[in-house]
Amino acid sequence: MSKNKFSLSDFLCKFYVYILLFVMYAPILLLIVYSFTDTKIIGKWGGFSLHLYKALFRDKEIMQAFANTFLVAVSSAVVSTILGTLGAIGIFYSGKRSKAFLEGLSNIPVMNAEIVTALSLTILFVFCGITFNFTTLLIGHVVLTIPFVVLSVRPKLMQMDPNIYEAALDLGATPSKALREVIVPEILPGVFSGFILSITLSLDDYIITAFTRDTAFQTLSTYVYGVTSKKGTLPPSLRALTTVITLIALVILIIVNIKSSKEKEK
């Protein structure tokens, strides 16, 4: 059978994927296009302009929310990556019964509704008499992202030769040294993927942020919700912010793909 022969099933599959991608990215592309025109109404082109970007970077409230968002995202990602990696290693080297129990336990937050996690944390903080502040917000984001780090690291542990750790111990390495110099380098791609995933989830989160933050501490999600609920429309400068965030995500994605390609070549 010729490889160039038309296949209806392949065509329909590709058509479905392209339609799905178009539906997903069309709203983002629309905001990006209209971020380069000074108009309050999307659909009415007012000529090419960078006014919205100037207004964005001059808006102290948006810039503060932007900085707060990245501070929370990076901080929670670092903590989640460390704890999640150690947790994944601990689960991997546990006994059969403990391993099955811990794996199931670590999957519960992934399957659980985010609102349930947010409410549980809120009730816990109130019960313990803890004032809502940056620490409670950080704990909420860490609870949200740790399971995804475990899920990212676990496949790399399964691909790793289980005997190399014991071999390192037999050769005189201490457990901590074997962990640092043998296991961690082997699972580093999974750790990096978990870190990036943690940042992405934290940047995108609204529910846990709204329930665990100090009301004076604004992130992008809470700021956008607050502004749109008051004014009923999206402020024009936020279209420029959408473009900036999309470009940052695109750069990170390109870096990850380049890194993955180099690792495959090795």
Image: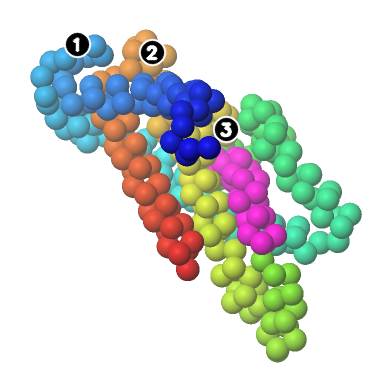
Question: Looking at numbered disc 3 in the image, what kind of residue is underneath it?
Answer: Ile
Q: Residue at x 43, y 58 (%)?
A: 261
Magenta span includes 142: yes
Q: Does 93 sit left or right of 205 as displayed? A: right
The answer for how far apart the CA atoms under marks 2 and 3 are is 21 Å
Q: At numbered mark 1, what does the secondary structure look like: helix, strand or loop?
A: loop
Q: Which residue is mark 1?
A: 44
Q: From which residue to which does the magenta span run?
A: 136-159
The answer to whether 177 is drawn above or below residue 194 in the figure is below
Q: Earlier in the sequence, mark 1 or mark 3?
A: 1
- Residue 200 in the image: x percent, y percent? 48, 41
The residue nearer to you, when weighing 111 against 120, is: 111
- Residue 149 in the image: x percent, y percent? 60, 50
Q: Which residue is mark 3?
A: 208
Question: Looking at numbered disc 2 in the image, what kind of residue is underneath it?
Answer: Lys
Tag 3: Cα neighbours inside 10 Å, few (<14), some, or many (≥20)?
A: many
Tag 2: Cα neighbours inside 10 Å, few (<14), some, or many (≥20)?
A: few
Residue 36's quadrant in the figure?
top left
Q: At numbered mark 2, what does the secondary structure look like: helix, strand or loop?
A: helix
Magenta span includes 145: yes
- Residue 79 in the image: x percent, y percent? 56, 54
Question: Looking at numbered disc 1 in the image, what kind of residue is underneath it?
Answer: Lys
The answer for how far apart the CA atoms under marks 1 and 3 are is 36 Å
